[in-house]
Amino acid sequence: MRVAGLVVARTLELVGESLEPGRTTGELDAIAEDSIRGAGAVPSFKGYHGFPGSLCVSVNDEVVHGIPGERRLAAGDLVSVDCGAIVDGWHGDAARSWVVPGAPADEATDALVTTEKRLGLGVLVADCTPVLLVDVAAGVIAAAHAGRLGARNGIIVNTVREMEKLGAQPERIQVVMGPAASGKNYEVPKEMAEDVERRLPGSKTRTSKGTWGIDVRAGLIRQLMGLGITAIESDPRCTIEDENFFSYRREGTTGRQAGLIWLEAN
């Protein structure tokens, strides 16, 4: 069984190395068959109930057990491959997924906006504020990462403006803000608090220690209401004090929690 598994592992490695725009799924299948037979093994899938390939290849939203053929891959395609091999009666079987290289890299960004159905948008945070927005009637969603600098520099205003370009209307937009660093625990120098306050009014505050702090969510609520958005839900939990959440300020090196939003197909 171990030998069969090693044949499959090496074959999948070759398939992954062979991914490039313009290559067909049938060509990937030929590469896999040569690898399997060259190792003295037999493809598990080929001929099984008439299946024509040595691999099952599914691209993007295709269901599993796709049949390899003439489909040409494009940069950015998600390719899922299932491979099986038989050695001395033992079956090895494994699957892997890759993204076809060559797609232009997205610039780092703090917000995403889409009208695409069933495309999830996500934001990763560990003290910064995850902001999820939707206009159901217009079919527009957005996910934004609102840290101190991003919020100060207008990331949410810019996100709303992009939503409006796609048909959203402020009075219909609904907003959810997730757990984040609270004003009572987000301690900063006075100069920093005042700087953020000038660009994000309502954010300057005092911490529970009486020192200067920033309440990003309070500032964002005021900003959103100024844009005409009133359907706002803000989770009051503080990531710094609540150990159920990751917190960069509390832990230094840490993980991230995710805020996710998507539109269901009609």
Image: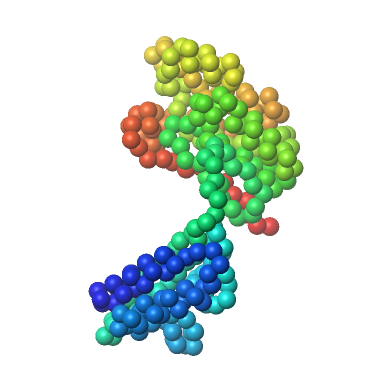
In the image, residue 134 lies at what x, y percent? 65, 42
Q: Quadrant of the C terminus?
A: bottom right
Is residue 237 visible in the rendered image? The answer is no
Give the residue at x 33% y 31%.
Answer: 252
In the image, residue 58 lies at what x, y percent? 51, 69
Name above or below for residue 232 compared with residue 186.
below
Give the residue at x 58% y 72%.
Answer: 71
Q: Quadrant of the N terminus?
A: bottom left
Compared across the picture, whether 82 is left or right of 234 comes to left
Is residue 153 visible in the rendered image? The answer is yes
Viewer-proximal residue among 208 and 58: 58
Give the residue at x 35% y 79%.
Answer: 36
In the image, residue 8 lies at what x, y percent? 34, 73
Viewer-proximal residue among 144 and 100: 100
In the image, residue 173 lies at what x, y percent? 68, 37
Name above or below for residue 91 compared with residue 231.
below
In the picture, residue 167 is in which quadrant? top right
Compared across the picture, whether 76 is left or right of 257 comes to right
In the picture, residue 92 is in which quadrant? bottom left
In the picture, residue 175 is in which quadrant? top right
Name above or below for residue 237 compared with residue 14.
above
Name above or below for residue 119 compared with residue 15.
above
Q: Name the colouring of the figure.
A: rainbow
Viewer-proximal residue among 148 and 30: 30
